[in-house]
C-alpha cells in the first residue's frame, strides 16, 4: 500500500497518515486530485490533527493542497475526510501574468510567457503540432488559464509531474488490449446527443465607440446543406482585432459534431493488463451490434491506495465530425440515387434483378402458393409438410400452419389454453401456468398446485385400480359359476 503523509503549512512539520484510504483521480478536465478518509488511532493521531485546509498531502512523491475537509465523531472515535488538488492548480492560480503579446507566436514563446516567475519548467514534443497561431493580447491572466488556452489553440494535451509540465499533440500510448462485446463487455448502450448541434455562428471582435466592430465574422458548417441553418449563440471577444484570428476562433466555437457516448461494464480489468494504463492511453473497443470497431481513449482514471481494489476508468466519447457525417450522407445518397428515380420517387426498374424471379403477383391477395416459392428454395432442400422435414422441421411447420393471415395482412395467433392446443400444447400451457415471476424478477413455482395435481392423479389411479379389481372379480365369477 502506498504511503500517505501530511505537512503543516506554517511549521513545516510532516507526519505519516497510516490507515487512511486514498482515492486518486486524474481526468482531462480537472487534472489530478486526492480524496482521503481515515479514523484517528494511536498510529496516526499526530497527523490526524493536521488534516485541515491548505495543509499539504504527500502521496507517491506528489503534493496535493487540501481544499475541503470534514471531521466528525462516531461514538468514542474521531473520523475525517478531505479533498485536495494537485499543487500545480494552487501555484498557477497565485500569480497573475500582467504582460501581453500579440501576433504570430509559437508554442514555446507562449509557454515562456505563461510560466514566467512561477518556478515551473516545461518540455514540448512538437510532432504533429502546428508551428504557430495568430493571437491578440495573449496574457493578462493567471498561468493556469493561459495553459488551458495554449492547449486549446494548439489542440494539444498535457501531463505534469511535480513542477514539470509536458505538452504534446497526444499524450499516452496504444495498449494492446481489446474490450469486446460478449467477451469482456456487458450491457453496452449507445447514445447520440444532438441537443447542442449547430451549423451557423457569428463572431465579433473589438467594439468601436460608435457601436460597430473592428472585425466581425461568420461561419457556416457544410452540414447546413443537409440539416438546415441552426444558429449558435454569437461568439464575442473584445481582444480580437485581426480578421484571420477571429475567423479561426469563431469556427472553433461552433459545435457541428455529434458526440456518441458508450457505456458498458468492462470485466477482468486487472487481468487484462489495465492496471498500469494511464489517462491518455487507448484500448480497442469492438461492439459488433453497433458497428463500432475503434480505439477508445482513457480520459479519466481513479485508483486506490488499497492494492486489492481495481482501478476505475472513464473512456472518451466518439465524435462524429462534420466530415464523417457528410461522407456517410453522400454514401447513403449515392446508394439511394442508384435505386430510386428522384423525379418520380419510384424504384428504378433496372435496379431490380428479375433473372431468377418466378413469382406471379398479378392476382395475388396477400398469400403465395408453394409453387411460387421455388426461387427461394436452395438446391437440395424441399418445403416442409406435416409429415416431412424441409427448410423447417415438421413440428415448426405444424405450428406455423396454425397462424391465420387476414385480408388486411394482420396475423391471428392461436393461443393455447388449458383445454385447447395453440402454438403451445395445452399440457405445456398447464405446466407453464405453474411458473410465476414476481416484480423483482424472481421465479416462483407453485409446488402446491403440482402436489394437488399429483394427488388428483394418484386418486384417479386408485379409482382405476379399484375398478380393475372389481372387473377382475366379475370375470372370475363368470368363469367359475360353481364357486359362487
Image (spheres, grey):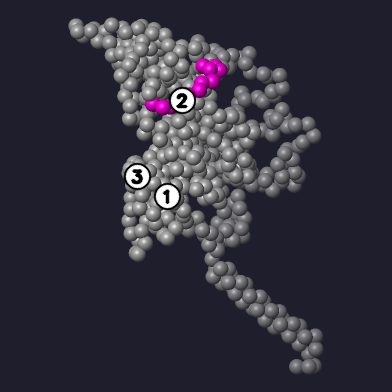
The residue shown at (57%, 58%) is: 432
Residue depicted at 38% across the width and 8% down the height: 103
Please indicate whether residue 368 sits to the left or right of residue 254 in the image: right
- The residue tagged 2 is 121
User: CA separation, marks 3 and 2?
Assistant: 27 Å
Secondary structure, mark 3, is loop
Residue furthest bottom in the image: 483
Work out whether 119 lies above or below 5.
Answer: above
Mark 1 or mark 2: whose residue is earlier in sequence? 1
Is residue 292 placed above or below 321 in the rendered structure?
Answer: below
Residue 465 vertical placement versus 49 (above, below): below
The secondary element bearing badge 2 is classed as: strand
Q: Position of residue 263 (x, y in %)?
A: 50, 38
* Crowding near the residue tagged with mark 2, few <14, some 14–19, many ≥20 C-alpha atoms within 10 Å: some
Q: Residues within 10 Å of mark 1 (few under 14, many from 20)?
A: many
Which quadrant is home to the C terminus?
bottom right
Residue at point 56%, 72% (across, down) = 452
Residue 319 can be seen in this image:
no
Q: Which residue is mark 1?
A: 15
SS under mark 1: strand
Q: Which residues are magenta?
A: 118-129
Task: Tell me: residue 173, above or below residue 439.
Answer: above
State the separation of the CA atoms marked 3 and 1.
12 Å
Disc 3 and disc 2 in contact, CB within 8 angstroms: no
Magenta residue check for 458? no
Is residue 378 at all visible to an observer of this figure? yes
Q: Return the residue at label 3.
A: 11
Q: Nearer the viewer, residue 450 or 390?
A: 450
Amino acid at each position: 500500500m502506498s504511503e500517505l503523509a501530511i505537512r503543516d503549512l506554517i511549521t513545516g512539520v510532516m507526519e505519516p497518515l497510516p490507515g487512511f484510504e486514498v482515492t486518486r483521480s486524474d481526468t482531462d478536465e480537472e487534472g489530478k486530485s486526492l480524496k482521503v478518509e481515515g479514523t484517528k488511532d494511536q498510529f496516526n493521531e499526530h497527523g490526524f490533527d493536521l488534516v485541515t485546509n491548505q495543509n499539504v498531502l504527500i502521496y507517491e512523491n506528489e503534493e496535493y493542497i487540501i481544499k475541503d475537509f470534514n471531521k466528525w465523531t462516531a461514538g468514542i472515535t474521531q473520523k475525517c475526510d478531505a479533498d485536495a488538488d494537485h499543487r500545480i492548480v494552487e501555484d498557477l492560480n497565485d500569480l497573475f501574468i500582467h504582460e501581453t503579446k500579440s501576433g504570430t507566436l509559437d508554442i514555446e514563446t507562449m509557454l515562456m510567457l505563461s510560466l514566467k516567475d512561477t518556478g515551473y519548467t516545461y518540455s514540448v514534443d512538437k510532432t504533429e503540432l502546428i508551428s504557430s497561431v495568430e493571437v491578440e493580447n495573449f496574457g493578462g491572466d493567471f498561468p493556469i488559464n493561459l495553459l488551458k488556452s495554449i492547449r486549446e489553440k494548439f489542440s494539444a494535451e498535457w501531463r505534469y509531474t511535480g513542477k514539470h509540465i509536458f505538452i504534446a499533440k497526444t499524450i499516452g500510448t496504444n495498449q494492446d488490449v481489446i474490450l469486446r462485446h460478449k467477451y469482456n463487455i456487458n450491457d453496452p448502450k449507445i447514445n447520440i446527443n444532438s441537443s447542442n448541434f449547430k451549423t451557423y455562428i457569428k463572431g465579433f471582435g473589438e467594439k468601436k465607440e460608435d457601436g460597430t466592430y473592428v472585425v466581425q465574422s461568420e461561419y457556416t458548417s457544410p452540414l447546413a446543406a443537409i440539416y438546415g441553418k441552426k444558429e449558435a449563440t454569437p461568439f464575442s471577444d473584445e481582444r480580437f482585432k485581426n480578421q484571420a484570428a477571429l475567423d479561426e476562433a469563431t469556427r472553433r466555437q461552433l459545435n457541428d459534431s455529434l458526440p456518441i457516448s458508450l457505456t458498458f461494464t468492462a470485466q477482468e480489468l486487472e487481468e487484462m493488463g489495465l492496471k498500469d494504463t494511464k489517462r491518455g492511453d487507448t484500448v480497442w473497443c469492438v461492439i459488433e451490434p453497433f458497428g463500432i470497431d475503434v480505439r477508445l481513449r482513457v480520459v479519466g482514471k481513479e485508483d486506490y491506495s488499497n492494492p486489492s481494489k481495481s482501478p476505475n476508468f472513464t473512456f472518451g466519447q466518439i465524435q462524429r465530425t462534420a466530415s464523417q457525417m457528410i461522407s456517410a450522407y453522400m454514401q447513403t445518397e449515392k446508394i439511394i440515387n442508384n435505386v430510386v428515380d428522384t423525379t418520380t420517387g419510384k424504384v428504378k426498374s433496372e435496379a431490380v434483378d428479375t433473372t431468377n424471379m418466378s413469382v406471379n403477383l398479378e392476382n395475388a391477395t396477400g398469400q403465395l402458393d408453394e409453387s411460387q416459392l421455388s426461387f427461394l428454395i436452395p438446391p437440395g432442400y424441399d418445403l416442409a409438410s406435416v409429415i416431412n422435414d424441409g427448410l423447417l422441421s415438421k413440428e415448426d411447420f405444424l405450428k406455423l400452419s396454425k397462424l391465420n393471415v387476414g385480408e388486411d395482412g394482420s396475423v391471428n395467433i392461436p393461443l393455447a389454453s388449458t383445454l385447447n392446443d395453440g402454438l403451445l400444447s395445452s399440457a405445456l400451457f398447464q405446466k407453464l401456468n405453474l411458473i410465476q415471476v414476481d416484480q423483482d424478477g424472481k421465479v416462483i413455482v407453485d409446488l402446491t398446485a403440482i402436489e394437488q395435481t399429483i394427488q388428483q392423479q394418484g386418486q384417479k389411479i386408485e379409482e382405476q385400480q379399484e375398478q380393475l379389481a372389481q372387473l377382475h372379480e366379475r370375470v372370475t365369477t363368470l368363469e367359475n359359476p360353481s364357486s359362487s
